[in-house]
Amino acid sequence: MILQQKDGLLYFKFENLSAFDEIEHAVFTRNNGLSQGHYKGLNLSHSVGDDPRHVNANRDAVSRILGAGVVVFAHQVHQSDIM
């Protein structure tokens, strides 16, 4: 993985996907971002109780870094059930 930094946010890119110009991707760390308290950092989830304004601002920052009009955010679930 390739570590990158832009506008104060750290993120990783997969080397094999970076070979394709038509695929923009990133795996962001929790560092920086606008969320406070328990959610401090770059929280991108609307489903955990964080202030929606902070989540939206964090998502906008990610979108700007990617230069994307539409960004897809996964809904990650931490459990042992397989769907």
Image (cartoon, rainbow, N blue to C red):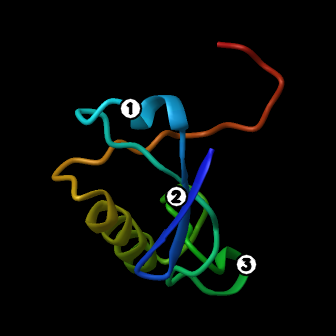
Question: Badge 3 is on which residue?
Answer: 38
Q: Residues within 10 Å of mark 1 (few under 14, many from 20)?
A: few
Q: Residue furthest front?
A: 19
| Percent x, y of residue 54 | 44, 79
Residue drawn at x 52%, y 58% as measured from the top left = 45
**Viewport quadrant of the C terminus:** top right
Question: Badge 1 is on which residue?
Answer: 19
Marker count (numbered): 3
Q: Which mark is residue 45?
A: 2
Pick the residue in front: 43 or 9: 9
Amino acid type, callout 1:
Ala
Tag 1 secondary structure = loop
71 sits to left or right of 81: left
Between circles 1 and 3, the one closer to the viewer is 1
Q: Which mark is residue 60?
A: none
Pointers 2 and 3 in contact (C-beta within 8 Å):
no
